[in-house]
Amino acid sequence: MDLANHGSAATDPRQFKSFAAFYPFYLSEHSNRTCRRLHFVGCTLALACLVALAATGKPQYLLYGLLCGYGFAWIGHFGFEKNKPASFKRPLYSFMGDWVMYKDLWTGKIPL
């Protein structure tokens, strides 16, 4: 899958009227393999924190999950992709995009 040709860095993510229209732009913002890998690690750790929260009932695991999920993603964007996360302008669609891309990475639809 060619991730770089799904949108433009000059595109304003607020213009999209549906998630289906937004997701190709989201993918274009994740063309760097290291950025995608950091998203994958962050999402996996966030899920582990959710399991820990459910198992222990300790609310700090919710904070840990958010820190892992967003921390790894933002390192990927600022350090490797050299862009700003779309979550600053389109938080719900970006959150949804994280999990759709996570699934696509697991299934091999997008290269990890």
Image: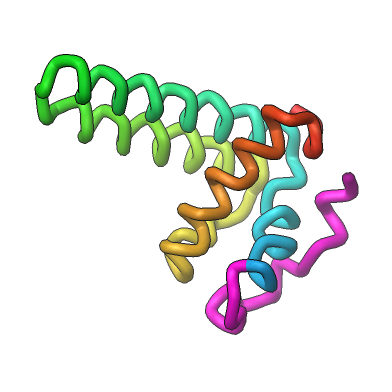
Q: Give the range drawn in magenta.
A: 1-19
Quarter of the image for residue 23 reads bottom right
* Farthest front residue in view: 55
Based on the picture, tell me whether residue 58 belongs to the magenta stretch.
no
Q: Residue at x 66, y 36 (%)?
A: 36
> Where is residue 70 shown, x and y percent of the image?
41, 41
Based on the picture, tell me whether residue 9 belongs to the magenta stretch.
yes
> Where is residue 59 shown, x and y percent of the image?
11, 30
Identify whether 49 is placed above or below 69: above
Identify whether 75 is placed above or below 30: above
Quarter of the image for residue 26 reads bottom right
Identify whether 47 is placed above or below 12: above
**In this picture, residue 9 sits left or right of residue 55:** right
Q: Residue at x 14, y 16 (%)?
A: 56
Colouring mode (rainbow / by chain / secondary structure / one colour): rainbow
* Of the pair 34 and 42, the residue shown nearer to us: 42
Identify whether 107 is placed above or below 3: above
Q: Which residue is drawn at 48% across and 32% down?
A: 43
**In this picture, residue 53 sits left or right of residue 29:** left
Q: Residue at x 57, y 53 (%)?
A: 97
Q: How many labels does the image show?
A: 0
The quadrant of the rendering that contains the N terminus is top right
> Where is residue 78 shown, x and y percent of the image?
55, 45
* Of the pair 18 and 84, the residue shown nearer to us: 18
Type of secondary structure dominating the magenta stretch: loop
Quarter of the image for residue 64 reads top left
> Where is residue 13 shown, x and y percent of the image?
58, 73
The quadrant of the rendering that contains the C terminus is top right
